[in-house]
Image: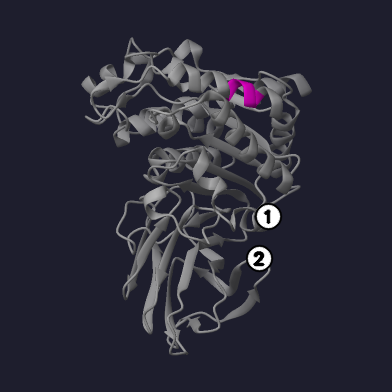
Amino acid sequence: MKRVLAAVGLCCVMHGMHAQTLSYIQTDSSRIEYPGDSSTMMYFFDLIDKMQSGEMQKIRVAHFGGSHIQAGYWTEALADSFQALGGYTGGGAFLFPYRVVKTNGPPFYRTHGDGTWKRCRAVPSEMCKGLGLCGMGAVTTDTVASFGFVLRPNAHISAFNDIRVYHNFNPSYYFQLPASFPATYRRMEFPEGGYTEFIFDQPIDTIHFDLHKTAMDNSEFFLRGWSIENNDPGFYFASLGVNGASTYSFLQCTEFNKELATLPPDLVIFSIGVNDSQDDNFQAAGFNARYDSLCANIRAVNPHCAILFCTITDNYIRRKYKNKRSLDVNAEIYKVAEKYGAGVWDLYTVMGGYGSIDKWYRSGLASSDRIHFKSEGYYMVAGMMFSAWHKSYLYHSAQKN
């Protein structure tokens, strides 16, 4: 039980300010609501019980969103807390070479690469064909290039012995580990799943691939990310955020469903909607339909997958105007949640409602754009979200016993 209690409080207190010390934060409203059937979340709770009893090894969680999620702080803090439920060090994560394409990413790993790489992402200004699960791509036409990453110290995954490299299977390109690579491994190709897999004989925390073009043509090598896992029990966390992403974004990724099926999630967390609400042409019906399609795609891959919605934050439009559309957006989220038996965590109300982003900014928890949080703000949000989920989990456990 000590580990469980540590998990609940971890994100709220590890970086200083506690939510209960701020009068404008409505901690009493921080709960998971179930507008409809809650059976899929109860099924997810049962999976956790099975992992804690040793009946299963891995539970998979995917967190989708925009810039709130690409920054990594929110999802990484959630991953830390879920791992603390059992003192787990196993599981895995989905990674993308953010640094290679000159954008920000989660702090628990650092990517590197040589050559010229172009960034694609699921927003109108950078959209391209072939995007997959994480909504981003790194593309090169160079004859020689490289890519890789190193895990940094963190509380949820420190090593892996299995990696899947998601990419286009272009016969003009071949990538490989350097001859000096210290571990022995098996390499397997899975074109139908869109990835090449490497299984190592020992845990590693660093990897580097050399890429070579074998034909003189104008074709591209398209890297869509990595999935890493180890053999110890624990939570696999996929942080799938794209700066500027809306509900429209992931629906445009042609490889999304195929890649999702290779890593079928047991829980999906949706934190999408701020960018939809910033659109002057926002229409509630269209927003509802897009979220409906996203949920349908998730359930097509795993009919038992639990879904948890996070309502959008209070925010400003173009740094000047308080966003009055947030309530309309959040009303549609509740409707979709009811249809799909999903849970809802009402961040909008918890953070203080209309105009509260100003208070978060004055407290040093939000950025001057009145949209994004600072790292401390994200840790606080993650802590309150996990605590709300955990209370629901404990209630379910008490009812079973």
Q: Is residue 328 visible to us here?
A: yes
Residue 131 versus residue 267: which sits nearer the camera?
131
Mark number, residue 261? 1
At a point 75% along the width and 19% down the height, the residue shown is 399
Q: Identify the residue at horizontal 60%, vertical 39% (top origin).
A: 268
Label 2: which secondary element:
loop
> Quadrant location of the N terminus?
top right
Q: Residue at x 53, y 63 (%)?
A: 160
Measuring from the top left, give residue 276's x and y in whole percent: 45, 32
Task: Name the image quarter holding residue 374.
Answer: top left
Residue 168: quadrant of the picture: bottom right
Residue positioned 71% across, 20% down in the render: 36
Q: Amino acid at mark 2?
A: Gly
The crowding category of the residue bearing disc 2, from other C-alpha atoms within 10 Å (few below 14, some 14 to 19, many at least 20), is some
Q: Tag 1's secondary structure?
A: helix
List the single residue furthest toward the front.
281
Q: In front here: 365 or 77?
A: 365
Left or right: residue 394 versus residue 275 is right
Q: Is residue 285 magenta?
A: no
**Magenta-span inclusion, residue 336:** yes
Category of crowding for the residue at label 1, using alpha-carbon neighbours closer than 10 angstroms: few (below 14), some (14–19), many (at least 20): some
Task: Tell me if label 1 and label 2 are in contact, CB under 8 Å.
Answer: yes
Query: For the magenta stretch, what is the residue range?
Result: 333-337
Residue labelled with disc 2: 193
**Side (left or right) of 45 relative to 142:** right
